Image (cartoon, helix red, strand yellow):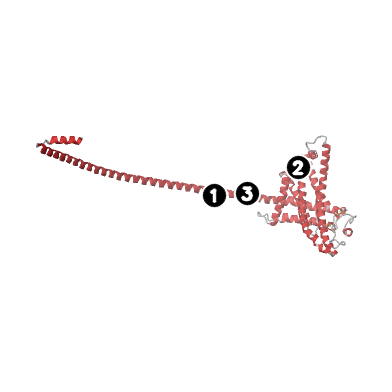
Amino acid sequence: MAAEGASPVMDPIHQFQVHPIFDLHLFGLDISFTNASLFKAIVLVAILALMVWGTRHRSLVPGRLQGSAEMIYEFVASTVRSTIGTEGMRFFPFVFSLFMFVFFSNMIGLIPGTFTVTSHIIVTFALAMLVITTVIVYGLMKHGAHFLRLFVPSGVPALLMPFIVLIEIISFVSRPISLSVRLFANMLAGHITLKVFGGFVAMMLSAGGVASLLAPLPLLAIPVLTAFELLVAFLQAYVFAILTCVYLNDALHPGH
Amino acid sequence: MISSAYAATAASGHGPDAGVAFPPFDPSSFVSQLFWLAIAFGALYWVMSRFAVPRMEQLLEVRRAKIAADLKHAADMQAKAQAAGEAYEKSLADARANAQTIAQQTQSKLNAEADAKRKTVEADLASKLAAAEKQMADTKAKALANVDAIASDAAAAIIERLTGKTPSPGDVAAAVAGAKAN
């Protein structure tokens, strides 16, 4: 990565670049295997390593890996149960996959030199659309036209109803946008901040004089920011999962 | 610096308009991103729903069942221990009661024996006492009778000395008896 471009070390945007590792075209579409694809694969392998390889012994008394896997499982399961209820457990593999994918993408992205899968709006938007599509398809399948009651809250005066329905529809349509932009923007901003602070250190050192003496200050900020980013990485995965649960709850129980 | 970054993007980007867009908004990578995301997430969902989640459910269920069984076993054992303890307490209480009865019986038997012995001794003593008293009374009566005779003799002698006549012993005895009665 560092070999290309003028000064990729100092460039905060460089880490988001997608470049092909080998070109692949299908039906005239560019589906090259890129560094983004590579990290999607790494995320997948890491999750499978934890959830499948880590639990291979099926020990009664779990070891470290199995303990971690169980902890995450129980955490997501309790989130799903408390948000959608026991009947929501049919969506558990979906919510769990989403949480794991986002969580591992965020976490792996924090390792210097890696690519953050969730820092691209197309990825987060695709995941958000997957959630909303699931909500709509399942809601219509289960409740048919009654699913549209989601937009018609009970106990609203008839005069206000058109406005309320309009607001409800707008809020429903904005869900995939807010869901995807929240995650994407958090990841993007966090990584840019880290890189900018890292760039400050290099710039101040090379500037010489007083600036060189002050160079350790941004360096001290980086561990703090990294800790904060670790929190954000977990929190955004959790927010993504819990909002998915909330939206799926609408599909199960459309009446307000 | 930023401009050089864009130059780098332009150099390394792919697709028709690479290099112009900010990488996360670069549409040239969208198709590839979506394609590989679909594969990665599809594979993830498949493995999670088919293998990982059922395995985890089974694992937790087995553990839950094992813990429940162990707890039940422990509760059973505790109940057994408690029953054994109660049985022990009961047998101890029985033995204690038994010992008490035996002690009581022995004591009452000993008391009865002592009573009987005491009664015979008392009766013996009483009869001896009565015999002694009788003897004393006899002796006293005899002595008293002797006193009568002495009094009669003395009275007869006094009367003889005074009167010169010998009174009949019957009169003297009657007079002594009369004086004694007074």
Name the residue type under label 3: Ala
Count of numbered circles on the image: 3
Residue A107: percent from left, percent from top: 77, 55
Q: Which mark is residue B81?
A: 1
Disc 2 marks a residue whose amino acid type is Leu
Q: CA distance from mark 2 to mark 1?
A: 51 Å
Quarter of the image with the N terminus of chain A is bottom right
- Of labels 1 and 3, earlier in sequence is 3
Residue A15 point in image, percent of width and height: 83, 58
Which chain does the numbered disc 2 sit on? A
The disc placed on residue A252 is: 2
Element type at mark 2: helix
Query: In terms of image quadrants, where is residue A166?
Result: top right
Q: Residues within 10 Å of mark 3 (few under 14, many from 20)?
A: few
- Helix, strand or loop at mark 3: helix
> Do the residues at pointers 2 and 1 share their chain?
no
The outermost residue toward the left is B164
x, y percent for residue B29: 86, 54
Choose top left, top right, bottom left or bottom right for residue A158. top right
Q: Is residue B129 visible?
A: yes
Q: CA distance from mark 3 to mark 2?
A: 33 Å
The residue type indicated by label 1 comes to Ala
Task: Tell me the element at label 1.
Answer: helix
Mark carried by residue B68: 3
